Amino acid sequence: MVSQVVAEEKPQLLSKKAGCNSHGQDSSYFLGWQEYEKNPFDPVSNPSGIIQMGLAENQLSFDLLEEWLEKNPHALGLRREGGGASVFRELALFQDYHGLPAFKNALARFMSEQRGYKVVFDPSNIVLTAGATSANEALMFCLADHGDAFLIPTPYYPGFDRDLKWRTGAEIVPVHCASANGFRVTRAALDDAYRRAQKRRLRVKGVLITNPSNPLGTASPRADLETIVDFVAAKGIHLISDEIYAGTAFAEPPAGFVSALEVVAGRDGGGADVSDRVHVVYSLSKDLGLPGFRVGAIYSANAAVVSAATKMSSFGLVSSQTQYLLAALLGDRDFTRSYVAENKRRIKERHDQLVDGLREIGIGCLPSNAGLFCWVDMSHLMRSRSFAGEMELWKKVVFEVGLNISPGSSCHCREPGWFRVCFANMSAKTLDVAMQRLRSFVDSATGGGDNAALRRAAVPVRSVSCPLAIKWALRLTPSIADRKAER
């Protein structure tokens, strides 16, 4: 009798959630991070390294923050103002997930100040979270069940595929926007996305926008916000307005930043028909340049949302010592007013340096007035007007030119050839180096001809579908991706 050996099945050590491939961070958007970390640029020790232009980080005003800290040592020393008694013990023991009242009051005032007091924030409607990533995910858990959908205008921040979907099970349906009108949101595009969601038998629970936009670098015009608010009011759904770049908007009114809450307040009846379904996400990562502090917030006039989100925030609290420090900093009104004005001035100056440098090379940008990046049209440099051509060009820019920029396809843009290029995470000298490298590349690619003329003569890129095989062709190891939670 022949004995049969039956191989034992290996036990599954990880859950299905941990082992699934829906994290979203394995897109081409993150591959440049891996290459940059292998070979980071340094003007002295590694001048031929890769320059990081895929990181939306505000490093332009650290000197202002450091100067304030030197003048206010009590905030870092965990003492009361004026060198008084230590608050170490009470902060060490504080674990109320509602947050320190002094910090919430200061944050509410700062958010109101950012919006010219056209919107006044009530501290009791603020939920503190560990960054905007946690805030957006918490709102998904509050507003959508597994398989429900949110509509998001394209192009959008690639991390939303992770932040909104991975753990919640929610779906994203893109609202397709086009370069023909500057990628502005239209009612027709919203209606089209809603119909596509219905065809997929998805229940649409809301619309999510970033205002100012990541990756476009544009503050949403009031008319566009009114269109979006009218749409959510008519459909009886929610609006999440991610306003983490509010303090980066450098254009003067009326072209400057307008909050979704300001538009709601301007509706008939003070927006009573929709005010409990409009929620704002904010953080201090961009306006103050403090992504490592992990300070985010949800603002909602819906008591049920505030209650549920507060309970969920226990999974990602802001440390008490961070709250204490920032309560002191944001509570200094003279400092915040001067900081905001100077920070915007520096952002505009660096933005103009990038736009002017690209223009001289013959590369155009979408006109922008906010953010820490520009939406750059490099389609005339592609060998083929396709997403395969975009990926080919992107790899040359990363590996040969030594610039880590973000391909538009990873932002779900339907038109190949657009790239997000960041400018606020480096010195002016490093940005000059980046422009010199790009100029050399463009000269070699075009034979040293009239690049501006070549750009003007370029055939407009038509809107096409972004094939999954191209968009996710290049993958990044989880160990690198998991360290990159910022935008």
Image (cartoon, rainbow, N blue to C red):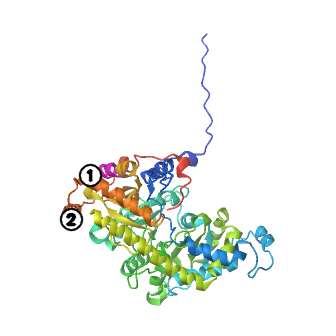
| Residue toward you, 400 or 410 | 400
Where residue 90 sits: x, y (%)? 79, 72
Instruction: Please report the bounds of the magenta region as a residue range.
Output: 387-394
Q: Does the stretch in magenta take in 390?
A: yes
Up-down: is 316 above or below 274?
above
Q: Residue at x 66, y 66 (%)?
A: 317
Q: Residue at x 50, y 65 (%)?
A: 57
Q: Is residue 137 left or right of residue 255?
A: right
Secondary structure character of the magenta stretch overall? helix
> Cα distance, mark 1 to mark 2?
19 Å
**Residue type for callout 2:** Arg
Where residue 279 sits: x, y (%)? 52, 75
Q: Give the labeled residue for mark 2.
A: 456
Q: Give the labeled residue for mark 1.
A: 444
Q: Quadrant of residue 66?
A: bottom right
The N terminus: image quadrant = top right
Mark 1 lies on a secondary structure that is helix
Mark 2 lies on a secondary structure that is helix
Q: Is residue 395 left or right of residue 480?
A: left
